[in-house]
Image (spheres, grey):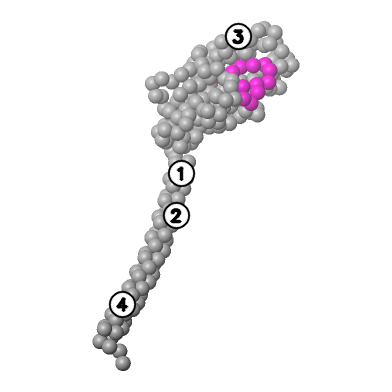
């Protein structure tokens, strides 16, 4: 038979075993609940990330549609009282018209043309003849005409070059670069284009054809590296 002290020890041990078992069960239940909450939190974070990614893609797509996109719609000699084709070729003055096909204004930065009777490389530096310091813009869906004596070449073509162009032994090439920004604060874009002049069969009227540089868009940083 157990003496009284031994019964006390057995009783206390049983109580400890019961309490320990209950605590282990409680800890297990709490761990299961925490694991469930962690899974819920993980799923919530994943869902929030997916929603954020979808919103970012939607915003990027919307901005891509909204940003201004300039397109060349007209390129020819400016209309003025020039007596002959020779005079037009010696000091060309061009009429360049671009249209904004975007949904927001294009903020003009600078504009220039490069004239040559030789090949104009794709990455050729085009001198800036005009800087727009007053925040001039081309509204969405509107056209803008560039015609000014500042856009003409700094030095007239020689009479020999003019004669060679008319004789079709040389071709007049004109490349342009229009830099512009947008209301989103995006990097400045450069819209580059290039045209070559050809005589029609009458030997008087001319037409213009695109060259390899036509309607190329590059970022301001990229263009600076190429120049």
Q: Which residue is mark 1?
A: 60
Q: Secondary structure at mark 1?
A: helix
Instruction: Please provide the residue range marked out in magenta.
Output: 113-124
- Answer with the quarter of the image where residue 23 lies: bottom left
Where 182 falls versus 174 (above or below)? Answer: below
- Whether residue 72 sits left or right of residue 168 in the image: it is left
- What residue is disc 2 on? 50
Q: Which residue is mark 4?
A: 16
Look at discs 4 and 3 and give the one toward the viewer. 4
Is tag 1's residue or tag 2's residue first in the polypeptide sequence?
A: 2
Label 3 Cα crowd, 10 Å radius (few <14 / some 14-19 / many 20+): some
Query: In the rendering, at what x and y percent does residue 227 appear?
Result: 58, 22
Secondary structure of the residue carrying tag 3 is: loop
Up/down of 8 relative to 110, above or below: below
Q: Which residue is mark 3?
A: 156
- Residue at image x 46%, y 44%? 60
Residue at the bottom extreme? 1
Mark 1 vs mark 4, CA separation in Å: 64 Å
- Main secondary structure type of the part rendered in magenta: loop
The residue carrying pointer 2 sits among few (fewer than 14), some (14 to 19) or many (20 or more) residues within 10 Å by Cα, namely: few
């Amino acid at each position: 038979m157990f003496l009284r002290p031994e019964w006390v020890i057995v009783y206390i041990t049983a109580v400890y075993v019961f309490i320990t078992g209950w605590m282990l069960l409680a800890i297990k239940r709490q761990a299961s609940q925490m694991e469930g909450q962690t899974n819920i939190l993980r799923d919530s974070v994943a869902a929030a990330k997916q929603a954020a990614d979808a919103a970012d893609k939607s915003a990027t797509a919307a901005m891509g549609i909204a940003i201004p996109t300039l397109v060349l719609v007209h390129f020819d000699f400016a209309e003025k009282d020039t007596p002959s084709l020779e005079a037009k070729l010696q000091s060309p003055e061009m009429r360049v018209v671009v249209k904004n096909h975007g949904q927001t204004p294009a903020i003009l930065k600078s504009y220039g043309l490069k004239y040559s009777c030789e090949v104009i490389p794709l990455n050729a530096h085009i001198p800036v003849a005009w800087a727009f310091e007053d925040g001039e813009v081309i509204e969405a869906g509107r056209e803008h005409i560039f015609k000014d004596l500042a856009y003409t070449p700094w030095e007239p073509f020689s009479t020999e070059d003019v004669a060679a162009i008319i004789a079709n032994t040389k071709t007049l090439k004109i490349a342009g670069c229009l830099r512009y920004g947008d209301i989103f604060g995006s990097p400045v874009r450069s819209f580059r284009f290039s045209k070559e002049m050809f005589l029609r069969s009458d030997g008087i009227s001319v037409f213009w054809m695109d060259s390899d540089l036509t309607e190329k868009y590059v970022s301001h940083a990229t263009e600076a590296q190429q120049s």
